[in-house]
Image (tube, rainbow, N blue to C red):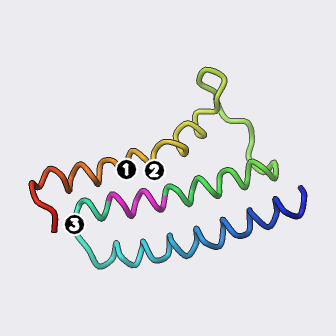
Amino acid sequence: MPTAELVMVVVKLSVGAIATFLAILLWANTRDTAWMLMVIGVVVEYAKIMYTTFEAFGILPVAPALFGIPFVQILVENLPLVLFAAGFIVVLSRGRLH
């Protein structure tokens, strides 16, 4: 793995860890559904970073595929956006923004 690529992985892991830590702190202080969906989205986004890192280093075995794409990859690539969208829908469904 080239040095520039390794630096990018370390930066992504570091920034993701900080964002995930702060999101978990927020989760402990809120019971708002929209915010909880956002927090879960951030945590899943960090799981995506971890998954791609493990995959790049060859730590993970080959996962079952759907249309030639590993099912886990489809899940971790799209689930954060689905959770963010659900959070936005919850806020919009309230009829007013705080």
Magenta stretch containing residue 87, yes or no?
no
Q: Contact, CB < 8 Å: mark 2 with mark 3? A: no
**Camera-side residue of 72 and 97:** 97
- Please provide percent x and percent y for residue 74: 55, 36
Where does label 2 land, which residue? 80
Amino acid type assigned to the residue bearing label 3 in the image: Asp
Q: Is residue 13 above or below residue 58?
A: below
Amino acid beneath label 1: Leu
Residue occupied by mark 1 = 83
Q: Residue at x 75, y 63 (%)?
A: 8
Q: Quick one: SS at disc 3?
A: loop
Tag 3 or tag 2, which sits nearer the N-term? 3
- The magenta region covers 37-43
Horizontal placement of 64 versus 94: left or right? Answer: right
Which residue does the numbered mark 3 point to in the structure image? 32
For the residues labelled 1 and 2, say whether their Cβ atoms are less than 8 Å apart: yes
Q: Which residue is pictured at 64% across the width and 29% down the height?
A: 69
Q: Report whether 50 appears left or right of 95.
A: right
Quadrant in which the N terminus appears: bottom right
Q: Earlier in the sequence, mark 1 or mark 3?
A: 3
Q: Main secondary structure of the magenta part?
A: helix
For the C terminus, give its image quadrant. Answer: bottom left
